[in-house]
Amino acid sequence: MKILVTGGAGFIGSNFVYYMLAHHPEDEIICLDLLTYAGNLQTLDAALQNPKFKFVKGDIADRAFVFDLFRKEKPEVVVNFAAESHVDRSIENPEIFLTTNILGTSVLMDASREFGVQRYHQISTDEVYGDLPLDRPDLMFTEETPLHTSSPYSSSKAGADLLVMAYHRTYGLPVTLTRCSNNYGPYHFPEKLIPLIITRALDEKPVPVYGTGANVRDWLYVGDHCSAIDLVLRKGKVGETYNVGGHNERSNLEVVKAVLRELGKPESLITYVTDRKGHDRRYAIDPTKIEKELGWQPTYRFDEGIKVTVAWYLENKSWWENIISGDYQAYYQKMYQDR
Ligand code: NAD
Ligand code: DAU
């Protein structure tokens, strides 16, 4: 199979590239990525040594460029990870979220139609379902839960999801869609909660917790997300949506404390800061469909995944130090200095 992976220089996309090269050495992977602040070519250093892998820099929303790439490369499968992915940035400036996440998705699907792609797979998020109350642990997101978004980010992802299903119904594009809960693991950009805690605590810097830290997220080790996508590509039913999650709900405070414990750092680093606007209270995925229909099972428990992740950040200091010493420093000042 010749697979076009968009957003493959980011967190989940790069983990997927490595997963596929390891599990399906017969497949060819082309990575299309714009290398925004979140994309890092260094992450793909090892993949670039593999003759089955090729990197192309470009914008998924650039129609002429994308059509040209499809004409040259003729991918059989497209997996779209490319997105603006950080909720806080979408609250600051929504526009680029609409361009990349919605327009970019439609351009990729138009090219997929034109060049007869056999499968277009869209990577979506549990955030499209909105949030759940903290005092109703019985409630979970199923594939039938109505879309009900809170942030410009989640609204842009929901817009893309609706387009994906519309392209299937209207044009018969062979699509599949996965909605996953919060991922964590190697190559996670240090603006997101877990890598932010790790990298700041290692520097003995305060660790910012929004509000009271009571908000709940449902954590999944990134490798388990990759295995779910692979399974959906090979066995999933065209036109279907699959929720992906591993029943690992934790409050933010529990997550922060677990990471500090693993690092051997004191809880006195925790600093409570003003809450995120429109902050979703709880996410919880019901993964019954992908488990029952496709036989998917996650392999990492949360405590195991945190151990592996902390160890990776300790062993790969130069990866995140390069990021923090660059643009990211200015971003951190802007977002947190008066908070
Ligand atoms: P990320 O921000 O780490 O990576 C995004 C990548 O997309 C970067 O490499 C960036 O350079 C690239 N990109 C951005 N705009 C582009 C454009 N216009 N053209 C080409 N490339 C572009 O994001 P991530 O956390 O790896 O998320 C990947 C996907 O998974 C996103 O669609 C996100 O919505 C979804 N998702 C993420 C999570 C999570 O916990 N991180 C959970 C569920 C779903
Ligand atoms: O649920 C899937 C989503 O998970 C993905 O669609 C998004 O792309 C991804 O960024 C992630 O969104 P969250 O908003 O849940 O992730 P984030 O790491 O930004 O925040 C996790 C929780 O931690 C959230 O409740 C906000 C809180 N938080 C975050 C940061 C950055 C803090 O308390 N302090 C912080 O400094």
Image (cartoon, rainbow, N blue to C red):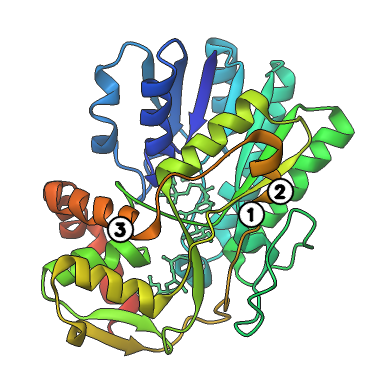
Q: Secondary structure at mark 1?
A: helix
Judge the density around disc 2: few (<14), some (14-19), many (≥20) Cα neighbours within 10 Å. many
Badge 3 or badge 1: first in the primary sequence: 1
| Contact check, label 3 and label 2, Cβ < 8 Å | no
Q: 106 or 145: which is nearer to us?
A: 145
Q: 142 or 138: which is nearer to us?
A: 138
| Contact check, label 1 and label 2, Cβ < 8 Å | yes
Q: Which mark is residue 157?
A: 1
On the image, the x and y values in percent for residue 229 come to 56, 36
On the image, the x and y values in percent for residue 137 come to 63, 76
Q: Is residue 265 above or below residue 287?
A: below
Q: Who's the residue at 77% across and 49% down the image?
A: 162
Q: Quadrant of residue 285?
A: bottom right
Q: Is residue 80 visible?
A: no
Identity, as a three-letter code, of the amino acid under mark 2? Asp
Q: Secondary structure at mark 3?
A: helix
The residue pinned by badge 2 equals 161
Question: Quick check: is the Cβ at mark 1 less than 8 Å away from ligand 1?
Answer: yes
The residue pinned by badge 3 equals 306
Q: Who's the residue at 42% across and 89% down the image?
A: 212
On the image, the x and y values in percent for residue 118 come to 69, 18
Q: Nearer the viewer, mark 3 or mark 2?
A: 3
Identity, as a three-letter code, of the amino acid under mark 1? Lys
Badge 3 or badge 2: first in the primary sequence: 2
